[in-house]
Image (cartoon, grey):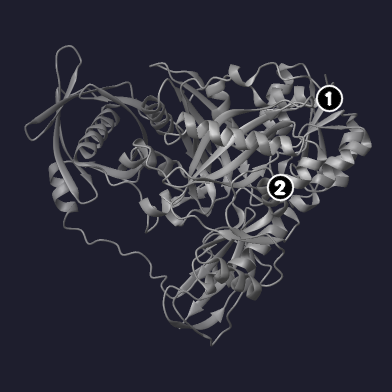
């Protein structure tokens, strides 16, 4: 077994590897850039080595810097995590020359499967079903458009060395193929240092289902069942689960057999994932093989009881797998929600800044038999940087069956406190509450189909409004009671949005509270006290976790993806408030503002140019992704206020229109 492992990565996956290595009694080394000097993975490792500036190309993607860190620390093995150098064959080869073990597959497999063009050809040779497409190198946007037209729209434009949704675009027309090729190539160059692009047919309304494989150096390869990864946004997975609600035993066996055959064809060992797209008739097609640990590996660990990082370490050390295919059992159901630093209310633009509050729900066994797990690389008071992936945490819930797992996840999301930056917790909560998700009717277009106009929040139902009005009334009453004698009866008006609820709270002789909505009475109980940001409220016998915070003259309440401000007023003040004029938002219709902190890659127009609706105006890069900003309507550019290369703040002016 190894004595010291260097983790050539950062964030939650570095912390994840460190956790298992320590349990196995192996010393750990973290590497860090200037931006990560105070990062959690640096704190948790036994040693830490600086490898360069904040930009990943000069630090986490710098093979010379990583090799020097290995020499300095005497590490005898390297775990690459995912992303960065995890699928870089040259890195694996150079480690081999240094006499350092790469905790991953052999160089041949990294080289063959890490290149999506080569992997498609090898998959076909191994008898794996593949998607129609063009596997040759594409030199220009015009050539890409010609090829796409020959395949037939829609097509998927993909980076050969890509992963994590980067360097991927769906094109439905020639114009989108031209633009998509350029954006994909730019993203691929930035993220992977490899700008090769290929094109394949895009299967409409598919499911994205992947098979986890595991092999040792003695020729044994087996699979650990499937993960459903269909809930995605811009090809970036958002929610994953294992098993899939769509896969039956026959389909699992067929996909598993092809995944194992592909892995065996390249002499695979270590953990890896074979990804498929599956249509409504259960036809499945090979998508790609990831020769590394997947972001969503925790759900497989939760249902199989295995530690995949441990298995990778043991395989790299030359140990045989300690179990056979027949020993693999999928027990219960697990769901993973990826918590991202991106604002769903602003078209999911990346968000950076300080985590003024970071308090995930407590991991481990929960009431009702569920289990929570939270893989993270951040801490309260830490900063989310512009330089790296926007993932904050991977919140996982396990339960004996899918409905219970969904309920456990919904409650866990309600109890996840995260402040200081924009984040996608409201979206995740909204999805958990949707009938379509609960029924398992998933496709890769789920988010686009369910939120066609973008995410604008969750509108409370009549029942939800009553619950929140009750909570607001109790919170307001207890705040007013502070330092004053408790009243036996308390009457106010709760105003939320356009709704208004006259309420009265009465207290019985035993301290119980009852809220009356004009004849409809419900009991409420809670241990909430002023200053508490999260509490359980039992309304009508049903318990809910609600986040509460003072907001101006009211209370901000967040629950089940609902985010609103409730104002609790005396009847007279409520009447007068209804007469006040509404404040209109500032008119920004003639301005193009930067929707996120980032670097302005290019501005495609000049002062005096006429623009059409949908025309590209500028491109901003943030968190390794290119974001194209387009004109919402016809107009003429009055002035350009920023230039390519500028670092822009949120809402900083880029263009002004006449």
Q: Which residue is mark 2?
A: 122
Q: Nearer the viewer, residue 317 or 519?
A: 317
Which residue occupies 46% across, 21% down?
A: 332
Q: Left or right: where does residue 202 sit relative to residue 195? A: left
Disc 2 is placed on an element classified as: helix
Would you say 433 lies left or right of 385 here? left
- Check the picture and name the quadrant holding the C terminus: bottom left
x and y percentages locating residue 536 in the rendered image: 34, 25
Q: Is residue 369 above or below residue 278?
A: above
Residue hosting label 1: 4
Instruction: Point out the tag, 1 or 2, that comes first from the N-terminus.
Output: 1
User: x, y percentage for residue 525?
Assistant: 25, 21
Quarter occupied by residue 325: top right
Q: Is residue 642 visible?
A: no
Q: Is residue 433 visible?
A: yes
**Mark 2 residue crowding within 10 angstroms, few (<14) / some (14–19) / many (20+):** some
Q: How many marks?
A: 2
Q: Is residue 474 left or right of residue 223?
A: left
- Determine the residue positioned at 49% across, 55% down: 203
| Residue mark closest to the camera, 1 vs 2 | 2
In this rendered view, identify the residue nearer to me: 487 or 250. 250
Q: Quadrant of residue 607?
A: bottom right
Residue 348: x %, y % from top left: 49, 53
Could you tell me residue 298's position as x and y percent?
57, 29
Going by the picture, which residue comes out furthest to the bottom? 608
Q: Secondary structure at mark 1?
A: strand
Quarter of the image that includes the N terminus: top right
Q: Residues within 10 Å of mark 1 (few under 14, many from 20)?
A: many
Q: Residue furthest top?
A: 510
> How far apart are labels 1 and 2 at the CA level?
35 Å
Above or below — where is 150 with respect to 443?
below
């Amino acid at each position: 077994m190894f004595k010291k492992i260097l983790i050539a990565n950062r964030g939650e996956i570095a912390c994840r590897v460190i956790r298992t290595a320590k349990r196995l009694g192996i010393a750990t080394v973290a590497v860090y850039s200037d931006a990560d000097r105070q990062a959690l993975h640096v704190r948790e490792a036994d040693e830490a080595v600086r490898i360069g500036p904040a930009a990943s190309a000069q630090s986490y993607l710098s093979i010379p810097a990583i090799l020097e860190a290995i020499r300095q620390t005497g590490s005898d093995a390297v775990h690459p995590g995912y992303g960065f150098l995890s699928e870089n064959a040259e890195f694996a080869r150079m480690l081999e020359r240094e006499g350092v073990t790469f905790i991953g597959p052999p160089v041949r497999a990294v080289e063959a499967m890490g290149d999506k063009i080569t992997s498609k050809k090898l998959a076909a040779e191994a008898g794996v079903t593949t998607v129609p497409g063009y596997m040759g190198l594409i030199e220009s946007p015009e050539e890409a458009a010609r090829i796409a037209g020959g395949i037939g729209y829609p097509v998927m434009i993909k980076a050969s060395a890509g992963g994590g949704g980067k360097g991927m675009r769906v094109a439905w027309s020639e114009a989108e193929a031209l633009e998509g090729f350029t954006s994909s190539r730019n993203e691929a160059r930035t993220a992977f240092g490899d700008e090769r692009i290929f094109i394949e047919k895009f299967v409409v309304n598919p499911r994205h289902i992947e098979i986890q494989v595991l092999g040792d150096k003695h020729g044994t390869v087996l699979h650990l069942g499937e993960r459903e990864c269909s809930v995605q946004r811009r090809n970036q997975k958002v929610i994953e689960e294992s098993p899939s609600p769509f896969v039956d035993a026959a389909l699992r066996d067929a996909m598993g057999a092809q995944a194992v055959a592909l892995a065996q064809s390249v002499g695979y060992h270590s953990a890896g994932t074979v990804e498929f797209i599956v249509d409504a008739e259960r036809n499945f097609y090979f998508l790609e093989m990831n020769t590394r640990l997947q972001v969503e590996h925790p759900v497989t660990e939760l249902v199989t009881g295995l530690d995949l990082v441990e298995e990778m370490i043991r395989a790299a050390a030359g140990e045989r797998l300690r179990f056979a295919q027949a020993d693999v059992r999928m027990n219960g159901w697990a769901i993973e929600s990826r918590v991202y630093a991106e604002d769903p209310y602003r078209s999911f633009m990346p968000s950076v800044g300080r985590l003024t509050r970071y308090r995930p729900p407590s991991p481990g066994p929960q009431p009702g038999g569920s289990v929570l797990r939270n893989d993270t690389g951040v801490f309260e008071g830490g900063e989310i940087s512009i330089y790296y992936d926007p993932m904050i945490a991977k919140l996982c819930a396990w339960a004996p069956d899918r409905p219970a797992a969904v309920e456990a996840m919904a409650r866990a999301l309600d109890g996840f406190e995260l402040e200081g930056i924009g984040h996608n917790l409201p979206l995740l909560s909204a999805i958990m509450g949707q009938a379509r998700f609960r029924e398992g009717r998933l496709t890769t277009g789920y988010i686009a189909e369910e939120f066609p106009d973008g995410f604008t929040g969750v509108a409370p139902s009549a029942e939800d409004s009553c619950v929140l009005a009750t909570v607001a009334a109790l919170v307001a009453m207890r705040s007013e009671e502070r330092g004053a004698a408790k009243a036996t009866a308390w009457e106010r008006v709760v105003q939320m949005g356009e709704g208004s609820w006259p309420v009265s709270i009465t207290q019985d002789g035993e301290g119980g509270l009852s809220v009356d909505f004009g004849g409809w009475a419900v009991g409420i109980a809670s241990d909430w006290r002023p200053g508490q940001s999260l509490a359980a409220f039992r309304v009508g016998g049903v318990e809910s976790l609600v986040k509460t915070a003072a907001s101006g003259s009211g209370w901000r309440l967040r629950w089940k993806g609902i985010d609103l401000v409730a104002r609790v007023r005396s009847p007279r003040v409520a009447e007068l408030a209804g007469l006040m004029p509404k404040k209109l938002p500032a008119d920004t219709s003639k301005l193009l503002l930067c929707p996120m902190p980032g670097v302005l890659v290019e501005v495609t127009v000049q002062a005096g140019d006429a623009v059409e609706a949908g025309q590209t105006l500028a491109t901003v890069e943030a968190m390794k992704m290119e974001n194209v900003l387009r004109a919402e309507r016809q107009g003429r550019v009055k002035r350009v206020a920023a230039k390519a290369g500028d670092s822009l703040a949120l809402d900083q002016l880029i263009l002004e229109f006449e």
